[in-house]
Image (cartoon, coloured by chain):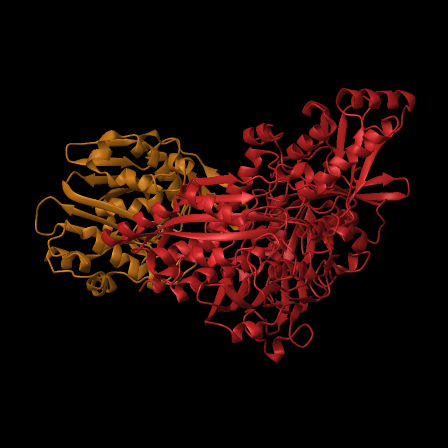
Chain colours: A red, B orange
């Protein structure tokens, strides 16, 4: 099935919010902009509005204009909507200003001076904070979590060798093609005025909850609508709540529509990034490389507020032991406050960081024992019936050993390796190598998260017999609409032309949960199927489920009998049977299921410049049943490209605690010239509890490439790189 | 934004004299970067050169190639004779931005912008190009190697316009252009190196480095070392000479150490097989 909005995106006919004409509800709208903190930490002593502007012509919002609590509703409500006299990171929002003339507004915003009495910021999450840097509790910890299995001391006592290593990953910017953008206006409603917010977002109900909380309104007086969204990758999971609140506050004060569209540099400087990490491994192994004990310490830089760090940490530590089984495991995780922009959701959500560490560590265990890295993986790889670090019993029938062997075969691994070693003996300055990573990714919310979400999907049967899927799960370029259409058409026995997917609008769609965590196809797709069952049951006779033309006729007949009424089938999440997780002790089924993957990278290192080029890349994975091969392949290829950037070039540079290289000129994402052909292979093994038999695919592709590439660089050069991004400037000293 | 739109070079020179500080604008590819954020520059005056057809295109004479001030990278990429006589010009042109930039951006603009990371300037300098400047008082020609006086500073007076670039037709038997960027395309040069060797004479080597000094820089000490045939056993043998010619810094794109090391390695490896004094590592 062709992607529904593919042609309009290809031709540029699709409009993002910034491209839309200022018509309809946005007629006569004002532009909104943000005055931001110039320093990382301190008390605001004075705000001076520049001379030479007629400030009566501008709308200015300060914290006192917030009707409810000055809090951004999320896990903990510690992040203010506007800095309440105190700033905790560079570029934190201080004041909002709106005006109809965008250029005049830019000048006015630049004229505002925020004076801050600076206090010592905590800027390096790896260091123990000094007393004058403590801002939370006694230690600046945002969250601490632990997984314990067996007894690591027993494992270390039996060790043939103990291998240690420290691994670091950097911050990463999402670089969605459309920067954050939001609009707001006021409509009349039956119980009073309604603040309508429409913009680029992944999670309409997160935005709704944030608006309800800080604007002190119930859901009948706040409405959230998603506009066509140009990418998210997690960057539009929690941040849109902030910009939506800003837009709504300006519109409430101005009583006029307001639009805020971030410039790329503002978006890069002021919005969330991937959590930087430091992971320490200490592993006891026997002569064959079998792990007897894993002691893993995970530290994440959380930035200035809690935001999503506790759940990123949770996913990070659950994936930290890799797709391996080990009797004795201790994983200690902490997320640390620093005075940088809050780190947030980003494709993989903590797992790519910890998988980078464990997969690089597996190669280093092999080197320490003088074994083949593949052997070390094979003796530890999970088999069905084995348990993970949380003591989850792995089942589902995927043969991970076969997947590894098959991938090596597709990648021509042995030949690559032989040829590289031959090439390296003769070339004056180029070195080639191959590297492997074996990975897993838990799909859906962690632990009991899906139960707490209690997601709902409606499928409406319309008078003409067609179906409309009503869910809050958003299309942001990944193909939600196309896949929902296909899943619904298959479930109903319909032609795809008779299936529609409604625009996420909190006045129309139920809360199917956030569009995150590789959960849309697997979890929400299943709800789409079950909502159709429920709809078919309502119009069927004697409980027999109608399908195809019979269902269509029955829906038409129902509407003839019930004119002006709505016909909807609703499904609410039910966990698969026997899935149990103790979220206090981190024991049990951390995820209902895992997707599995193997990556093989072939690289070439130029010893003159220390530049790494990826020559060939194979990504093989079990993601259950593949619903749309083109879209799924695109997800994998896109994820690999994003991971190549994270591994090699995407370095966030800081100056005084703020992002310094906040332009696409100096923050280096790969171009098509920088990536090889990415060969994608699916090992299909339908998952009975996923929509259409699917497991999650969105995040898995981000997990394997960075360690596979660094393992290949180590093979090519004999160097031992352990930190990414492995820029030429970082690799050069390792090659000396 | 005040834009002056002359239709002849004479009129452009008159306007330059009348509006001190007016900014000449050809392809505008440097000017428009982050334009909405550069509000102060919206208030300045600009001299749009696009109507000056006499400055367009490339011309061959018996002993030189002339690039008009409006000649674009694309114009050069379209000229087969340039590709055979001055192959480094298309090599460099292909490395500037993307095709959209290559079709608008001009060689003269690249000189005028004065970036030490320019890609067009170093190849012109390695071919020993000169720059002709015009004002209401007449014209003068300056060798490109002595055009710059400091970071984004040059001998061009505020009322002068670059009208053409002349490249002498002198045979080279070796020419190479290296651009080290942070990625393979759409990158700003972190370290650049251009080497040409004249087919005959005693001062045959020309070495031009970019992104390692306040300006694009000819490297006379390195050239002298090569011209005297000093034996080279390793990149480090070039370090002292480069240290006399360039002064790399740490900045947002790279480090001084990286630039220094890579510059020497690039030159050393480029010389293998073409330089009598160079030994294989």
Residue A173's x, y, as percent?
55, 52
Q: Is residue A507 left or right of residue B161?
A: right
Q: Residue furthest bottom?
A: A131
Instruction: Pinpoint residue A221: horizontal percent, then vertical percent.
Output: 84, 45
Number of numbered markers: 0
Q: Position of residue A521 (x, y in %)?
A: 66, 40
In the rendered image, the vertical position of residue A459 relative to residue A185, given as above or below: above
Q: Is residue B10 visible in the rendered structure shown here? A: no
Dividing the image into 4 quarters, which one contains the C terminus of chain A?
Answer: bottom left
Of the pair A502 and A187, the residue shown nearer to us: A502
Instruction: Give the camera-side residue of A164 and A160.
Output: A160
Residue nearest the observer in this picture, A193 or A178:
A178
Quadrant of the rendering where the N terminus of chain A is positioned = top right
Quarter of the figure with residue A475: top right
Q: In this image, B40 relative to A180: left or right?
A: left
Q: Nearer the viewer, residue A5 or A433?
A: A433
Q: Is residue B189 visible?
A: yes
Q: Residue B199: x percent and y percent?
A: 11, 44
């Amino acid at each position: 099935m062709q992607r529904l909005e593919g042609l309009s995106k290809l031709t540029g006919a699709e409009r993002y919010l910034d491209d839309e004409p200022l018509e309809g509800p946005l007629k006569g709208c004002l532009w909104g902009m943000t005055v931001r903190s110039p320093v990382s930490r301190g008390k605001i002593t004075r705000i001076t509005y520049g001379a030479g502007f007629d400030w009566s012509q501008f709308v200015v919002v300060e914290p006192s204009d917030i009707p409810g609590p000055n809090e951004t509703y999320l896990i903990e409500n510690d992040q203010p909507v506007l800095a309440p006299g105190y700033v905790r990171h560079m570029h934190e929002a201080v004041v909002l200003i709106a005006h109809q003339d965008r250029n005049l507004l830019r000048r006015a915003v630049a004229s505002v001076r925020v004076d801050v009495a600076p206090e010592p910021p905590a800027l390096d999450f790896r260091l123990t904070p000094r007393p004058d840097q403590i801002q939370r509790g006694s230690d600046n910890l945002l969250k601490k979590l632990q997984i314990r299995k067996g007894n690591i001391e027993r494992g270390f006592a039996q060790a043939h060798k103990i291998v240690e290593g420290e691994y670091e990953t950097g911050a990463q910017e999402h670089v969605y093609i459309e920067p954050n953008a939001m609009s707001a206006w006021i409509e009349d409603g039956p119980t009073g005025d309604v603040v309508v917010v429409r913009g680029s977002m992944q999670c309409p109900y997160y935005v709704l909850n944030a608006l309800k909380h800080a604007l002190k309104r119930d859901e009948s007086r706040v409405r959230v609508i998603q506009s066509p969204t140009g990418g998210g990758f997690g960057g539009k999971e929690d941040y849109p709540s902030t910009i939506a609140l800003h837009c709504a506050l300006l519109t409430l004060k101005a009583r006029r529509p307001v639009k805020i569209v971030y410039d790329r540099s503002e978006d890069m400087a002021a919005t969330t990034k991937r959590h930087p990490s430091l992971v320490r491994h200490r592993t006891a192994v026997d002569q064959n490389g079998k792990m007897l004990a894993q002691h893993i310490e995970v530290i994440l830089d959380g930035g200035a507020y809690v935001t999503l760090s506790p759940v990123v940490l949770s996913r990070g530590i659950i994936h930290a032991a890799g797709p391996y089984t080990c009797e004795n495991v201790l994983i200690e995780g902490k997320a640390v406050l620093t005075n940088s922009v809050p780190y947030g959701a980003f494709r993989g959500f903590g797992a790519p960081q910890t998988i980078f560490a464990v997969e690089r560590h597996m190669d280093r265990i092999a080197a320490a024992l003088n074994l083949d890295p593949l052997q070390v993986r094979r003796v530890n790889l999970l088999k069905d019936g084995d348990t993970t670090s949380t003591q989850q019993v792995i089942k589902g029938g995927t043969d991970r050993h076969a997947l590894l062997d098959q991938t090596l075969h597709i990648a021509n691994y042995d030949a690559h390796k032989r040829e590289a070693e031959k090439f390296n003996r003769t070339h004056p300055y180029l070195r080639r190598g191959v590297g492997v990573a074996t990975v897993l990714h838990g799909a859906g919310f962690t632990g009991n998260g899906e139960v707490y979400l209690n997601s709902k999907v409606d499928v409406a049967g319309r008078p003409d017999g067609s179906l409309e899927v009503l869910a809050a799960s958003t299309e942001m370029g990944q193909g939600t609409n196309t896949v929902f259409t296909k899943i619904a058409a298959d479930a109903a026995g319909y032609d795809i032309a008779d299936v529609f997917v409604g625009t996420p609008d909190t006045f129309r769609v139920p809360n199917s949960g956030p569009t995150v965590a590789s959960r849309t196809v697997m979890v929400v797709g299943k709800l789409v199927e079950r909502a159709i069952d429920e709809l078919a049951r309502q119009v069927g006779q004697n409980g027999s489920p109608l399908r195809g033309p019979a269902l269509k006729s029955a829906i038409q007949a129902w509407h003839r009998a019930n004119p002006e009424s709505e016909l909807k089938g609703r499904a609410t999440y039910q966990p698969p049977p026997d899935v149990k997780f103790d979220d206090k002790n981190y024991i049990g089924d951390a995820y209902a299921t895992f997707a599995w993957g193997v990556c093989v990278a072939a690289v070439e290192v130029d010893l003159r410049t220390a530049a790494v080029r990826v020559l060939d890349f194979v990504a093989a994975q079990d993601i259950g049943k593949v619903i749309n091969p083109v879209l799924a392949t695109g997800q994998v290829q896109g994820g690999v490209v994003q991971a190549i950037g994270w591994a090699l070039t995407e370095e966030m540079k800081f100056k005084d605690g703020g992002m310094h290289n906040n332009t696409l000129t100096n923050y280096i994402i790969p171009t098509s010239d920088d990536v090889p052909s990415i060969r994608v292979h699916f090992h299909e093994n339908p998952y009975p509890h996923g929509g259409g038999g699917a497991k999650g695919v969105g995040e898995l592709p981000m997990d394997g490439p960075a360690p596979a590439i660094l393992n290949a660089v180590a093979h090519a050069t004999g160097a031992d790189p352990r930190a990414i991004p492995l820029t030429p400037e970082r690799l050069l000293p390792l090659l000396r | 934004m005040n834009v002056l739109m002359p239709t002849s070079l004479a009129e452009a020179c008159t306007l330059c004299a009348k509006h001190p500080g007016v900014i000449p604008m050809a392809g505008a590819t440097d000017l428009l970067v982050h334009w909405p954020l550069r509000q102060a520059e919206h208030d300045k005056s600009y001299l749009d050169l696009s109507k000056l057809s006499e400055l367009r295109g490339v011309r061959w004479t018996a002993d030189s190639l002339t690039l008009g001030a409006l000649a674009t990278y694309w114009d050069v990429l379209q000229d087969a004779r340039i590709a055979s006589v001055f192959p480094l010009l298309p090599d460099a042109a292909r490395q500037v931005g993307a095709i959209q930039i290559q079709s608008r951006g001009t060689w003269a603009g690249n000189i005028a912008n004065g970036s030490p990371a320019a890609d067009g300037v170093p190849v012109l300098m390695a071919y020993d190009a000169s720059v002709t400047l015009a004002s209401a008082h007449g014209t003068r020609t300056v060798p490109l190697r002595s055009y710059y006086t400091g970071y984004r500073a040059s001998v061009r007076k505020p009322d002068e316009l670059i009208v053409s670039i002349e490249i002498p037709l002198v045979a080279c038997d070796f020419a190479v252009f290296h651009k080290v960027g942070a990625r393979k395309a759409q990158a700003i040069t972190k370290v650049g190196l251009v080497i040409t060797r004249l087919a005959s004479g005693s001062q045959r080597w020309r070495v031009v480095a970019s992104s390692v000094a306040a300006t694009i820089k000819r490297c006379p000490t390195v050239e002298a070392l090569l011209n005297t045939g000093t034996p080279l056993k390793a990149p480090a043998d070039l370090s002292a000479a480069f240290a006399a010619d360039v002064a790399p810094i740490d900045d947002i794109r790279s480090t001084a150490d990286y630039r220094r090391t890579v510059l020497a390695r690039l030159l050393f490896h480029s010389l293998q097989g073409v330089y009598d004094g160079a030994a294989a590592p």
